[in-house]
Image (cartoon, rainbow, N blue to C red):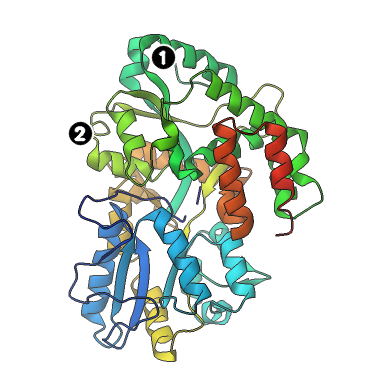
C-alpha cells in the first residue's frame, strides 16, 4: 500500500537524482550503510520525493541546530530502490542507525532476528510521547506484544480520485458500485480517455485494487486468515472472484494502455490524471500533496474529486472499511553503537512530529497521526480532503494495512510478482490463488 507512510509511497523521481540514492543537501553531509554521522549522532535512510523529503530535511536541520552532539545524517532513496537496499543492508549488518519502514511483516522479520531495538521500555519511560499518537498506529509497530518502531508521518488510506472536468464533460457521476465502474470504463473509452491511470510497473499500485476488492467481496476475515497463515487461506472463493473481476477490468481496457511500463516513482500515473489523459486513479492519499505541488493548479482549482472505493453486489465487506497505511515507522538498528542509539531516541522524542512538522504535513494535504488536530484540519485550505481522510480512518470498522507491508518480505515479494502476472493475464485467478497459497508460513 507498501509505507509507510509514505508515507510509504511518496515519490517524485527528481531528474537530478541517481536511480538509487541522493544525499541530503544539508551541512550534515551523508553516510553510507552503517556509518556514523561524523558528528556524534546517528545515520538515517529515508524516502526521496516531495513534500515528504523537504519536510523531513527541515525537521533534521532544526534538530541538528539544537543538538550539536546528536546530529542526524540523512540519505534519501527512491521508494522501490529503498526496499531492496535496506533489506540487503540489514542482512549484512550494515543498516543505518534509523531504519525507515512500514511496520507489519517486514518489521516482524527484523524483530524476530534481533536486528532492531525493542522500544517498549523506552515508550514506558516516555508516556506523554506515546499518548501523542493515535492508538491504532501502534498495531503495525508491535511484534509479540513489544513495540519495535516509532510511528510517524500521517494516515494514508487508499482513495479513489477522479478528474471532475472529465466527469462533467461525460455527464456522469463518480462510481458507487462495481457495476458503475464497468459502465464508466465504456463511457471514457468511447471518449478516447483512459478510464483509470495505473503505475503498474511498480506492482504495489496494482495491489491496491486487490486489497479493496477482496475486502468488499469477502470482508476483512479473508485476509485476516491469510495473515494468520491458516491452511488454504488464499484459496477462499473471494480471492478467485477478486482476481476474476480484475481481469475483467483489464480486458475491458479499464487501465491506461501500457500501464505495465508506468512507474509510481516517476509520478507519471498522477500526471495522467491531472493532465486529463485518465479519468480516475486509485492511489494513496499522499498523492494529494504531490498533485497539489506538481499538478499545475489542478488541485487548487477544485478539479480533483475523491470518493471511497465502491461496493460490490453481494459482497460481505462494510463499505466504510479502508485499506492503506496507518502510518510510517522508524526503527533503530540493534547493531548501532550506544551513542548512535541515544541520538536516535533523542531525535524520536524531540525531532519527529513537532508542531512545525505537523503544520507542514497538514499544509501539504496530509493528516498527521497525532491527537488534537481537528482545529488545524478545519482551518486548512485543504480541509475538505483532510476531513475526508480523517473520517475514513476514524470511522472505518476495519482498516487493512497494505498487504506487502503486513506479510513477510518473502510472501510480499511473491505477492507482487503474482499480482503483476495477474494484471498482465499471464496467469489465471485460480493460478494466482494457488501460487500465493504456497507462500503461507513463509
The residue shown at (29%, 26%) is 303
Mark 1 falls on what kind of element? helix
Estimate how packed mark 1 is, as few (under 14), some (14 to 19) or many (20 or more) residues with alpha carbons within 10 Å.
many
241 relative to 361 in the view: left or right: right
Q: Where is residue 292 in the image (x, y as percent from the top left)?
A: 26, 39
- Kindly indicate the quadrant of the structure image that contains residue 81: bottom left
Which residue lies under the disc numbered 2?
296
- Kindly indicate the quadrant of the structure image that contains residue 384: top left
The residue shown at (41%, 26%) is 256
Q: Say whether residue 150 is visible.
A: no
Q: Say whether residue 426 is visible.
A: yes
Mark 2 falls on what kind of element? loop
Q: Where is residue 361 in the image (x, y as percent from the top left)?
A: 32, 53
Q: Is residue 143 above or below residue 200?
A: below
Q: In this view, does 327 lie above or below 167?
A: below
Q: Where is residue 363 in the image (x, y as percent from the top left)?
A: 28, 49
305 relative to 399 in the view: left or right: left
Which residue lies under the disc numbered 1?
188
Q: Where is residue 239 in the image (x, y as percent from the top left)?
A: 70, 36
The residue shown at (44%, 70%) is 99
Q: In this view, does 55 lie above or below 1?
A: below
170 relative to 128 in the view: left or right: left
The residue shown at (35%, 56%) is 78
In depth, the one of 383 and 203 nearer the eye is 203
Q: In which quarter of the image is the C terminus?
A: bottom right
Estimate how packed mark 2 is, as few (under 14), some (14 to 19) or many (20 or more) residues with alpha carbons within 10 Å.
few
Amino acid at each position: 500500500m507498501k509505507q509507510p507512510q509514505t508515507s510509504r509511497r511518496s515519490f517524485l523521481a527528481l531528474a537530478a537524482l541517481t536511480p538509487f540514492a541522493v544525499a541530503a543537501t544539508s551541512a550534515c553531509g551523508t553516510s553510507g550503510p552503517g556509518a556514523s554521522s561524523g558528528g556524534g549522532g546517528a545515520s538515517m535512510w529515508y524516502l526521496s520525493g516531495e513534500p515528504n523529503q523537504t519536510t523531513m530535511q527541515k525537521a533534521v536541520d532544526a534538530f541538528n541546530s539544537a543538538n550539536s552532539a546528536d546530529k542526524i545524517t540523512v540519505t534519501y532513496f527512491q521508494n522501490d530502490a529503498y526496499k531492496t537496499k535496506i533489506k540487503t543492508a540489514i542482512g549484512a549488518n550494515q543498516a543505518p542507525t534509523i531504519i525507515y519502514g512500514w511496520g507489519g511483516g517486514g518489521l516482524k522479520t527484523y524483530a524476530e532476528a534481533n536486528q532492531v531495538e525493542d522500544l517498549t521500555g523506552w515508550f514506558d519511560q516516555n508516556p506523554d510521547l506515546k499518548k501523542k499518537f493515535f492508538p491504532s498506529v501502534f498495531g503495525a509497530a508491535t511484534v509479540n506484544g513489544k513495540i519495535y518502531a516509532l510511528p510517524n508521518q500521517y494516515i494514508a488510506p487508499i482513495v479513489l480520485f477522479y478528474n471532475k472536468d472529465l466527469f462533467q464533460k461525460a455527464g456522469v457521476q463518480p462510481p458507487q458500485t462495481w457495476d458503475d465502474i464497468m459502465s464508466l470504463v465504456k463511457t471514457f473509452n468511447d471518449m478516447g480517455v483512459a478510464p483509470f491511470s495505473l503505475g503498474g510497473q511498480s506492482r504495489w499500485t496494482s495491489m491496491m485494487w486487490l486489497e479493496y476488492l477482496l475486502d468488499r467481496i469477502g470482508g476483512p476475515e479473508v485476509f485476516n486468515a491469510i495473515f494468520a497463515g491458516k491452511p488454504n487461506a488464499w484459496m477462499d472463493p473471494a480471492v478467485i472472484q477478486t482476481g476474476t473481476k480484475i481481469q475483467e477490468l483489464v480486458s475491458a481496457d479499464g487501465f491506461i494502455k501500457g500501464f505495465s511500463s508506468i512507474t509510481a516513482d516517476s509520478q507519471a500515473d498522477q500526471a495522467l490524471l491531472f493532465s486529463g489523459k485518465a479519468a480516475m486513479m486509485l492511489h494513496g492519499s499522499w498523492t494529494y500533496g504531490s498533485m497539489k505541488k506538481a499538478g499545475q493548479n489542478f488541485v487548487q482549482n477544485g478539479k480533483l474529486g475523491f470518493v471511497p472505493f465502491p461496493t460490490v453486489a453481494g459482497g460481505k465487506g462494510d463499505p466504510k472499511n479502508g485499506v492503506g497505511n496507518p502510518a510510517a515507522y522508524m526503527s533503530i538498528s540493534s547493531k548501532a553503537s550506544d551513542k548512535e542509539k541515544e541520538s536516535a531516541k533523542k531525535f524520536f522524542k524531540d525531532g519527529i512530529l513537532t508542531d512545525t512538522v505537523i503544520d507542514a504535513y497538514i499544509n501539504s494535504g496530509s493528516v498527521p497521526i497525532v491527537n488534537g488536530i481537528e482545529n488545524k484540519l478545519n482551518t486548512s485550505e485543504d480541509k475538505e480532503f483532510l476531513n475526508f481522510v480523517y473520517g475514513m480512518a476514524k470511522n472505518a470498522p476495519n482498516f487493512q494495512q497494505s498487504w506487502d507491508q503486513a506479510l513477510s518480505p518473502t510472501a510480499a515479494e511473491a505477492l507482487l510478482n503474482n499480482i503483476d502476472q495477474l494484471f498482465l493475464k499471464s496467469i489465471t485467478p485460480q493460478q494466482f490463488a494457488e501460487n500465493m497459497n504456497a507462500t503461507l508460513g513463509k
